[in-house]
Image (spheres, coloured by chain):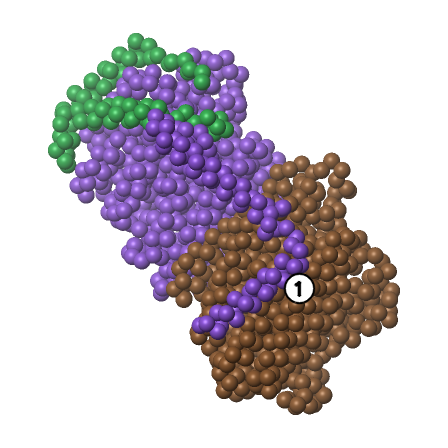
Chain colours: A purple, B brown, C green
Amino acid sequence: MDAELLHHPAIWLILGGIVMGFLRGAPRVLLSLSLPLVAAWLLWQIPEGIYGGVPFLDYLLDVLQVDRLGRLFALVFMLALFVGSVYAMGQRSRLEVPAAFVYGGAAVGAVLAGDWITLFLFWELMAIGSTLVIWAGGREAYPAAMRYLMVHLFGGVVFMAGITAHLVGGGSLSIEPLALEGVAHWLILAGVLINAGAFPFWSWIPDAYPRASWSGMVFLSAFTTKTAVYVLMRSFPGAEVLIPIGLLMAGYGLIYALIENTARRVLAYAIVNQVGFMIAGIGIGTEMALNGVAAHAFAHIVYKALLLMAIGAVIVQTGKRDCTDLGGLARQMPVTTGFAIFGALAMSAPLTAGFITKSLVLQAAADAHLTWVWLAMMVIAAGVFLAAGLKVVVFVFFGESRDLDAEEAPPSQRWGMRLLALTSLAVGCYPPLLYDLLPYPIDYQPYTGSHVVFQLQLLLATTVVFFLLRGHLVKMLGSLIDIDWFYRTLGPRWVKVMVYGVSIEIREVVLVLMRGIANLLGSLRRHYGTRGVLARTWPSGSMVMWVALLLMMYLALFYLS
Amino acid sequence: MLTQHFPALLVVVPLMAAPLIVFARRSLASWLIALLATAITFGIAASLLAQTLSEGTLVYAMGSWEAPLGIEYRIDAAGAFVAVIVAAMGLIVMPYSRVGIAAEVRSEEHYLYYALMMLCLAGLLGILVTGDAFNVFVFLEVSSLATYVLIAMGRDRRALVAAYQYLLMGTIGATLYVVGVGLLYLETGTLNLADMATRLVDVGDSRGVLAALAFITVGISLKIALFPLHLWLPNAYAYAPSPVSAFLAATATKVSIYVLMRYFFTIFGATEVFDARATGAILLGLSLAAMFIPAVVAIFQHDMKRLLAYSSVSQIGYITLGISLDSVEGLMASAMHLFNHALTKGGLFLVLGGVVLRCGGAGFDRLAGLGHTMPVAAFAMVVGGLSLIGVPGTAGFISKWYLVSAAMHEGQWWLVGAVLASSLLAVIYVWRFVEVAYFRAPPADHPAPGEAPLSMQLPALAMIAACVYFGIDATWSSEVSMRVAEVLMYNPGVGQ
Amino acid sequence: MRQNALFSPGKRLWHTLLAALLLMLVAGLFVESHPHFGIDAVPGFNAWFPMLACAVLVVLARGLGRIFGPREDEDGR
């Protein structure tokens, strides 16, 4: 076993998180602020290379692999943990921040994993850690936490099946690009895509994340989907199937974000949208595209966390979550409003991180002469600025005041936002800060006259459209039925919506089907319930009957075969 | 040398401890004797395992009468491995029992409890060590009779009914087994298992042999509680005193599984029962049913003990699934899960025993808010539950991994799916406990909250800790399981 | 559902916005650009294309909202 493993930042983050669970007050805050810095320092000390030699399950695991890509993601995750801890200083839950460290630590472990098994182990730990973070959101969050856990354990199971098949079939233990041939690789891809929030497993993001506490969602937005993006970059760069998958996610995220009323759900849909954008970028697969995806993962974590922090501050002050209940907060919370506006601009305006990263991916699509992909990405860039940026900021902070009782966000929250804004600004003004960390050498000048002018055209035009169509946007605020409806409430209402306007006969058929399903569920309960046939304390006679039956079956099969 | 008598002493020590305890009669004295006897037994079992791993099969002629005239004790790595599990569980349950039975068994019956535990232990170990088919039956009955009485000691009146049902079913199982052995004796003219294996090759698969296989399989399946012959198990586990539930859950069914493996691979191994007949296919079907149906039933339970009992039936399905694959990898996964599940379920029942002591029952209404009233116990239950699901970092994950790999070696993709889908059912029933323990308020009439006494808590936590340890460092368990599988598969008692 | 009070941009904001857009459109004619596809060589592409796209998106979302929404369960919160 290599000595460097003692400096593995993920292990220190996870252990620190567990210790934090037993602390409260100032010691907890102190530990949560120092730990990410210590972890980043540890990571910086380890030279690039592979460290391992840990025996597990007939394999020698390369637990720690430091290279440019892994290090970039790990550093971003540590930044998210640090800023999140600053923001969450006032969090009263004793569970949330410690759980977030286990979760974030596991994410760091996953992006620094040198082999599939280590990756999978951290992957599962992430599922548990993130469930606890959601769980800390309070009583209304419990059912969503359970649904979230089930989706991720299911994803984990698919992922594990893929990995075992890959290894049993003689595949290499280390994480290398896969050819997408055979069941094993498809299973791995499916397992990762479930965590990324791809169709048809995307509704867990808007379902579970917005139920976390005001600070919980800041942590949640950073790790799970980006880890999935990282694994896709490692194992399926240039897999063309990722382009339609990603664009579908992006389109779904856009439409739903446009309609959604709950502010943080809008941002959750925007996460799906941007992760889709990144996945499409991985599908392009050139060095430029991969650089762009890695960079954009960083920029996205920063601006999305900034927006979530601003909304989180509003939730703390007002207790309201919906656009229709909010409005006019700019007067009471001017600083928070300022950061929210900056967060919206940081998606793509010049001088912010989003500008120098998004253009990389777009450039890659242009270089590869993928006309339709490039056009779709233009739509995504404009649409997300309208749906998640302008809409959230204007509806929450401007407009008629609702006489809400609100004060400016406390200093800890303001510092969290300030740090993120400064990060975005610093990277936006001096791109080499980020470009030098990217996996491949890069020769791209973001600040040319045409880049800046065209981007400003796009932003200004989108803003004009937003103000022109704001009436429509307000009228359609609500929630849409999503995929999760199918597995959550196959209720009569759904049926009514689906057969609305269809002839009476079809409606009758559907009703009969519904009754059949209800009967089936009832009989399931009759058989499996506490008083069910299969659970009742059977009279000994029927047990003996089973013995006799089984014996007969064996004898018959033996003699007949 | 004393060591050469170890195979006999493994049975003799607990067997002799039983009458001693009856003579001693006093609760404390009988506990001390039992504790000493189990400690010695565990030492012997451990040294036997070390010996068999390094030297191969050990043969011991009872009273120096050589086989086939006399009864022969014959122990190899497979038997010794299960013996270590059984003896270790005995050793863990004994210190636990002192307080553990105080609330559940009348004090004038304490000595009986210890004496019966010793008899049960002797019986189970006897099955593992003997090389004689009829002797297996004798020890099976010794352990079963002791078990019936132990279950009946539960303070719930339903314990009597449960014990009675188990008695009926157990007797039928044993009878079927003995009929099978009789048929084999007719065909081969020997009761010595090693001899039998050699001679069966010449006899081939005559009707008598096939009938014997059917009778023995069904008889042992009853003892294993293989679905759908599991019906005695939930009640027996639910109403027995807590230490008894824990001991039985970790040992009794496991020993029977060992017997089944022995017969399938060592005795009938050379006659190609799996290839020519439907044995494997039937076992596969029953295993799949076991993995799913009892798991769904477990989800609907309102009592933690019954939930765990149904989960046991479901987990037994994984073990028999490995057997039905008829490959070294499958057998290895079975042996692995046999060990890991003994750890997990033993640990869970031990923790639950402490909870029952404090809360006065294992019903979900009693367990509500456990996360606040008994945080350590509730957390230990959750860790054990994670191992039932097979979350990485717990012993259950190791078993799941090897089982999935074994299924893939055979190219059985759909079995991989079945194993993983069944583990998702485990998530649901484990979540039910989490929901009760953490999301519900404790009942208003909750008795004095607080953790279980240390003498119960320490053994329970030790088991749960072992669950995690063997989930992280599975070197030892995987190496031994591999040896066990190889011994069972390639060493069918012939040509010793 | 309660209607959100509309935020109406004042005359000054409108004028600034439109003036800025116009300025950028003019500037776009003078900067050196590298069109890749042809369509992006059309003057002001980066202004009219997003405008069009956003309008289509809103109409699309409105239509979908009529068919599938509103969803009235605990998720509305």
Name the spot of residue B286 as percent of width and height, x first. Answer: 52, 61
Which quadrant holds residue A394? top left
Extreme residue in the top direction: C11
Give, as a three-letter code, the residue at label 1.
Met
Taking the image as shown, residue A277 lies to the left or right of residue A86, namely: left
The structure residue drawn at horizontal position 79% and vertical position 71%, both measured from the top left corner, is B18
Which quadrant holds residue C40? top left
Name the spot of residue A62 as percent of width and height, x first. Answer: 42, 59
B299, above or below A250, in the image: below
Taking the image as shown, residue B358 lies to the left or right of residue A125, namely: right
The structure residue drawn at horizontal position 33% and vertical position 31%, both measured from the top left corner, is A254
Name the spot of residue B49 as percent of width and height, x first. Answer: 61, 75
The structure residue drawn at horizontal position 84% and vertical position 69%, both measured from the top left corner, is B22
Residue underneath mark 1: B169
Is residue B445 in view? yes
Taking the image as shown, residue A368 lies to the left or right of residue B19, namely: left
Total numbered labels: 1
Front residue of B240/A322: it is B240
Name the spot of residue B472 as percent of width and height, x first. Answer: 54, 59
Quadrant showing the N terminus of chain B:
bottom right
B463, above or below B120, in the image: above
Q: What is the crowding at mark 1: few (fewer than 14 residues within 10 Å), some, or many (at least 20)?
A: many
Quadrant showing the C terminus of chain B:
bottom right
Q: Chain of mark 1?
A: B
Is residue A68 in view? no
